[in-house]
Amino acid sequence: MIKNRILRRLIPAALMVSAVAVSRPAQAVNYQALVDADTKAFQSYFIKEFPEVKLADYANGVYALNEDSRRQWQEMEEFPPYELDIEAGKALFNKPFANGKSLASCFPDGGAVRGKYPYFDEKRKEVVTLEMAINECRVANGEQPWPGNKGDLAKVSAYMAYISRGQKVDVKVGSKAAYDAYLKGKAFFYGKRGQLNMSCSGCHMEYVGRNLRAEVVSPALGHTTHFPVFRSKWGEIGTLHRRYAGCNENIGAKPFPAQSEEYRNLEFFQTAMSNGLQYNGPASRK
Ligand code: HEC
């Protein structure tokens, strides 16, 4: 009885509330604030898990965690295996296309623009990565695009990353469409897949610092700051999307092509999680 009376009193109030909500003009959602909250929670996870690691150090991948492997890596970085790739990338960046223009004609600041990528293009409604922009410049000038995961594309990307070292990671999500792309990347990161039914987060959050076969698993925080990477196992330099494909294959999941929408959205999400760190590519890895 009492309950009924309360309900009767509440229902008109609820109706009024919804009527007000309908008549009010739609309020702009602050998508950036939603992403910032995610980033904060994501980074806090690692800060809590590894209180001794400085936040800026996550840009160094697994070497942020382990003193021994860090020392070996620092020795390797004294004569970096990617040095020749940076030189080659510089030459390719300035080499004239058949029409006389060059990659240098497409990018401002002499190509020191790593910090601007990836970004969400509001007109095209898609994530644009640095490698994608490089290839689009070539195509716009009548050249063939380069394969997306290694070779010349990775070399130019390495050169552009090198001259951009120290730029801040600052992914912006300013619209519903950008947020949708971000959410797709986020779902990819946390989604289980493959014969092993594992997610990126299952390894690169929950298994960080532990051994998996011969390797120590790196933290997902900072994953995108240092690419492209010269990997001893590859014997050459490769892009972030090449690594994505490798990790997908390792768990028996179908890899997506480099620069596919799936991997661009994943890169967009992963980079947003590293907001505030610095770009420090290219890098060397085992
Ligand atoms: C079964 C565990 C496992 C899963 C699942 C996995 N990875 Fe990895 N990943 C590794 C290992 C091991 C390495 C090599 C050591 C390391 O972490 O740097 C690696 C390396 C990487 C690297 C290179 C890190 C660097 O500093 O160069 C990136 C980036 C990466 N993974 C992203 C991903 C993403 C994104 C996913 C989900 C699509 C994923 N991985 C799924 C185990 C995994």
Image (spheres, rainbow, N blue to C red):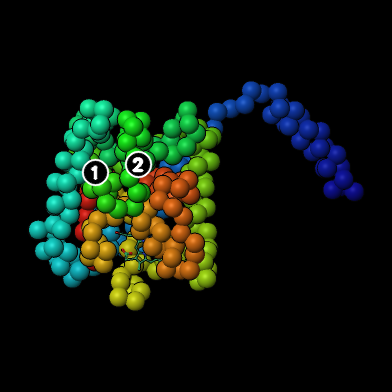
Q: Which mark is residue 145?
A: 2
Residue, x 40% and y 63% (percent of image)?
Answer: 247
Farthest residue in the front direction?
98
Residue 7 placement (x, y as % from top left): 83, 42
Image quadrant in which you'd find residue 160: top left
SS of the residue at dot 1? helix
Q: Is residue 196 above or below residue 116?
A: below
Residue 259 placement (x, y as % from top left): 41, 47
Viewer-proximal residue among 231 and 75:
231
Viewer-proximal residue among 22 and 246:
246
Residue under pointer 1: 156
The answer to whether residue 95 shows anywhere in this view is yes
For discs 1 and 2, the disc positioned in front in the rendered view: 2
Image quadrant in which you'd find residue 157: top left
Farthest residue in the left direction?
78
Residue, x 44% and y 50% (percent of image)?
Answer: 263
In the image: residue 206, left or right of residue 281: right
In the image: residue 169, left or right of residue 235: right
Residue 21 placement (x, y as % from top left): 69, 29
SS of the residue at dot 2? loop
